Image (cartoon, rainbow, N blue to C red):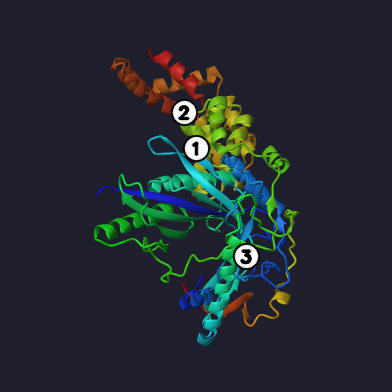
Amino acid sequence: MSLSTDDVAKIAHLARLAVTPDETGALKRDLSNILDLVAQMDAVDTADVEPMAHPLEMAQRLREDRADREDRRDDYQANAPAVENGLFLVPKVIE
Amino acid sequence: MQWETVIGLEIHTQLATQSKIFSPASTAFGAAPNTQASLIDLGMPGVLPVLNREAVRMAVRFGKAIGAHVAERSVFARKNYFYPDLPKGYQISQYELPVVGEGRVEIVLDDGVVKTIGVTRAHLEEDAGKSLHEDFHGMTGIDLNRAGTPLLEIVSEPDMRSAKEAVAYAKKIHQIVTYIGICDGNMQEGSFRMDANVSVRPKGQAEFGTRAELKNINSFRFLEKAINFEVERQIELIEDGGKVVQETRLYDSAKDETRSMRTKEEANDYRYFPDPDLLPLEIDAAFIADVVADMPELPDARRARFESDYGLSAYDADVLTASRAQADCFETVAEVGGDAKLAANWVMGELAAALNKAGVDIDASPVAAGALGKLVARIKDNTISGKIAKDVFAAMWAGEGDADDVIEAKGLKQITDSGAIEALVDEVLAANAEQVENYRNADPAKQPKMLGFFVGQIMKKSQGKANPQQVNALLRKKLS
């Protein structure tokens, strides 16, 4: 399967990756190869195989519902670029 | 052309756990910004989510409450998108294998017809944080206290055909989740948020029209208005030769209109995949049995029991079971008061009116259920009349003590001594000889109404304390 340049640009945008035009060609080839590999796997008959959600054959352990009320905000915000009134500040986002 | 509206709802209910779905941070509402955001909620490198057992129990409880299949095995997936209030760059949700499968609820329409609405699924997921767009020197403030709060997203089938039906369904889900104690139902605090998928089609057409998604509606009234506006908009658009585009729209309650939220067509490409940080969730029969064992009585069952056990009308039973708190209150009042019908009247009447006027929830009522029960008991045993009881209730509401204290302190005990009542009756009849004459000469059909005059005079003279039944009986005897 062959991806278009637009496909690559869209995938890069969804992942917020800044891909330059001269990188696009190589990426297009690599991504198309990955899809070809998946297509090969797709051809295998897996009718009797249960879909795998996780490589470990174990179930999720559950945690008791106990709240830890210790406030460590100052520590956690120590490496934030901008903070005010306890809020993290980020470049303005408008819908 | 005749148009038909098609509506499906997605309801996000915040689960009433102590801690978050994947981290031990507290879920309490109203804390200072970011004081309840743990390393896991902040999406710091190297941390691992661990699933909260109580959140799973609550999801299972909901599944069993709507007769749904609970999946023996469900899977958490990453829903990928970028927004500053989502630190990880993905929301942990469930996609292909949700914890709760197909179920159904019944709603009652205005004409009394019962309609079944299908629930497609319900899945566990984490909430995002909050963005504050007030001006922080041209920047946006982010509070991640809400990030990681457990949500159960309840998705309906497109079974509703009007805004009224959608509201009835949403209220039913609200009633169920609050009854079974998995959600506090507080809509102002965002514990219960609704998205409506709305489309129209010519009546008789099998295929659905293109739908618009109305996002984040947090009141039943706005839900109805938003849907009605959107239906009108779509019909006008199509009749003018236009086409409805699939998009997300926001309801503006100030303008009473919906408007497009996302202009770009890139939305809804979330690239879901199973979250490698979380193993599949396995729920065995013992876990389900344990959840079912402490399932509270559901609203529909309780309503039926109120009719059969207490002899209440369908209407009374419906009103009293609207919320679990109100139903609990009624049962206490009926038990303590010893009279279900009186208890029902007081809970729906005086108590509801006082709560409404004061803007207080029934849980925080100054007159507790037990205290109201004692008041009802005093009406039942004829210590006071229903009318005097209203004054006693007002005094209890004002904090002047329990029913017996107030009755004692104000000397409100009903006069039931027949000699004393007879004296009052004689006095009033003697003072109103003309009216007595008129009464005796009147058309018998008009007499019951005229009797009211004398009753009123006697009650006034006794300061409301004469037993009304005895007064009526005596009057009729003396005037005949």
Q: Judge whether B380 appears above or below A35 on screen.
A: above
Which of disc 1 and disc 2 is earlier in sequence? 1
Crowding at mark 3 (Cα within 10 Å: few <14, some 14-19, many 20+):
many
The picture places residue B423, in percent across and down from the top left corner, at 49, 20
Disc 1 chain ID: B
Q: Which residue is mark 1?
A: B319
Q: Are marks 2 and 1 in contact (CB under 8 Å)?
A: no
Q: Tell me: B350 left or right of B26.
A: left
- Label 2 to label 1, Cα distance in Å? 33 Å
Q: Amino acid at mark 3?
A: Ala
- Label 3 to label 1, Cα distance in Å? 36 Å
Disc 2 chain ID: B
The picture places residue B438, in percent across and down from the top left corner, at 30, 19
Q: For residue B389, which quarter of the picture? A: top right
Q: Tell me: B289 left or right of B420.
A: right
Q: Which residue is mark 3?
A: B147
Q: Which mark is residue B459?
A: 2
Q: Amino acid at mark 2?
A: Met
Which one is in front in this view, the residue at disc 3 or the one at disc 2? 3
Q: Residue at x 47, y 30 (%)?
A: B314
The picture places residue B383, in percent across and down from the top left corner, at 59, 27
